[in-house]
Amino acid sequence: MHIDRHERLWTVIATAIMATIFAIILGTSLALDIHPPSNVETVDSQRLHLTDEFAADNLGVSRGPDGGLVVRLVAVRYAFVPREVTIPADTRITWRLASADVTHGFHVPGTNLDSMVVPGYVSEIHGMIREPGDYAMLCNEYCGVGHQSMWTRITAVPPRQWRARPGEGGR
Amino acid sequence: MPLDRTTRGLIFAHFLVAFAAFLVAAILGVYQVLERAEIIPALISAEGYYESVSIHGNLMAYVLTTFFILGFGYAVAPASLRQPIWRPGLAWLGFAAMMVGLVLVAGSLVTGNATVLYTFYPPMIAHWTYYVGSALVLLGSLPWVVIMIVMMVRWKRRNPGERVPLVMYATTANAILWAWTLVGVGTEVVFQLIPLSLGWVEGIDVGLARTLFVWTLHPIVYFWLLPAYTALYSLLPPAAGARLYSEIMGRIVFILLLVFSLPVGIHHLFVDPFQAAGWKLFHAFNTAIVAIPSLLTGFTILATLEESGRRRGGRGLFGWIPRLSWGEPMVAAAVGALLMLILGGFGGVVNSAYAMNTVVHNTMWVTAHFHLIFGGTSVIMYFAIAYLLWPKALGRVLHSTRLAVIQIVLWFVGMVVLTTPWHMLGLLGEPRRTAFAGYAETFAGQWEPYELTMTVGGAVLLVSSLAFVWNLVATAVGRRAPDAATPHLTFSTARDHEEPIPTMLNGFTLWNWIIALLMLVAFGYPILQFFLIETYPMVPFKW
């Protein structure tokens, strides 16, 4: 099989380009433990209100058993519950979301917080918002005719000013 | 062999449906950018936008493509193999099934009973006619797959030891790719969506449905792209007055595209919670491989164009570029296609980058990538193919070659003006497929200048679309061609057309076994897991 000299060279270059890109992706993912949400955890989305974790009075910010902060949210047409969340900036937080109806998305533009929220499954994301300020958490997957209005305000405050508000994550 | 009456009838019927759908979808596209930009209050309607996106997506992605690609195959097979179409009755039966399906799908869409966009979104459930219609369109395309494979196999039996013409090898590769592609969505529609829409089952496992859908979601894009590549390798060189730089590379490219566009779908599920990280990385790796044949195509086609320019007197490093036959629609389209492939390919590498995907997932960035690769690279070549085949199917002369070139240039300009602001909007976090920004002005205010720019791109694309359809209509009622009864098609000759080629690059048996193995590895456990863990099906919802 005869392949032109220039094409042979270009094949090597093209393969090297893609190999380099993938090596960087693989290296950073494994070395820095950067992975998209992949927790493969099921939940009965039709009975969310009866589960311990996603019952209404357990939503919002709370402390996990290891002392870390956990934000629990329910995505339901057309809102995230609770409607407002205040968190400390520059702090690693675990976000756990479940849908009460259809498939939703969850994206905080300007950060690495992005996940699908699929009925029947729990989405878990680990991440932080570095700078204090107001952020929008948008639904970024078509969920019905009210989809464009589905969002929640996230307020990130300097870590020392932050404390859990009463009634939020009250358990 | 000249294109006989049967062949010309099949090309005409398929192209007619494809481009009628294209015209409707193009007009809706302009409505969508205007609606999203919120500059004309009377147009703003969430229901209107989502219904419009549903129709635009179904028509562009399923009707334009499937009908066009089948018509193109019916032209390529008899012309390149010099034998009449095998069982034309079967081809027409498939066409009839697709038309019945199309009527059902269109009925459910225009009555607002299928506003599930075009990627289904279970547990939102449309009227059952939408899914049954979709299944009929898919089933109706299978006779074409059989006809392409049978014609190639019969030709090989009659011509032992000879090489299948590259254009037919590529077209058969696409037919085989299509058969593999349909397995995922076919299973989802038949076993999940139709039973749920008819109320035969109570709920749906959304994780399983989404996994089956992405089996199809990536290779289907290559099914749309392969005819564009086929034209670059086989129809561009004669139009440019050059030999194809290398045929062997073309065969390798089509095999790589066939094999590696399939086991990659889970890259669409990077941020879905129901697939584990290892599978996502494996599919990200395969995605990196499938970028290579596109890079190879870029080289071979540019080298072919360079030879064309030099033959026509071009000198120096870049002097061959102005000497290209720019007045040929096929040449203008090929250059536009390659440029948009570079822009869209760059965005695609970002999408596929596992962790970086998080920043742009479901944003307008993805819409920009998709419109550059599909609306750009693929469809601009469909135009050039149509300018070649439509007149031959009708025995006419193309109404205006000059208008054809202008239309192609306008399409390129419109796509760039449309998708550049979309890339920016994606980075700023604007979600795709969203009627308008119902968020606080503090977040959405910075999107406005880009939304104004995108409407300009949409307007240019509409002008281009109208010019395209006008040229075809004027051709249909225009001058008869001197060779009206015996139109011929000319395919490329390669510089290396006398070099021997290995048997494995003249058939598909080995590659089908490799695909079967790869798909078993790539999708076996990701699908099986839903039957091993306790899952909770979800009841259906309206939108």
Image: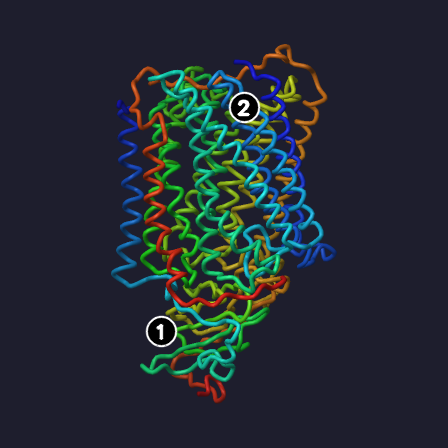
Marks 1/2: CA–CA distance: 60 Å
Res. A151 image quadrant: bottom right
- Look at the picture and state if B123 lies above or below B461: below
Count of all numbered marks drawn on residues in the image: 2
Classify mark 2: helix, strand or loop. Answer: helix
Identified at 32% across, 39% down, the residue is B514
Observer-nearest of B143 and B68: B143
Q: Amino acid at mark 1?
A: Arg
Observer-nearest of B28 and B448: B28
- Look at the picture and state if B112 lies above or below B490: below
Res. B93 image quadrant: top right
| Residue beneath disc 1 | A92
Observer-nearest of B88 and B361: B88
Q: Residues within 10 Å of mark 1 (few under 14, many from 20)?
A: some
Q: Amino acid at mark 2?
A: Ala
Residue A146 image position (x, y, % from top left): 63, 65
Kindly identify which chain the residue marked by label 1 belongs to.
Answer: A
Classify mark 1: helix, strand or loop. Answer: loop
Note whether residue B143 is visible.
yes
- Look at the picture and state if B103 lies above or below B156: below
Q: Residue furthest front?
A: B200
Q: Residue furthest top?
A: B482
Q: Residue furthest bottom?
A: A166
| Residue beneath disc 2 | B75
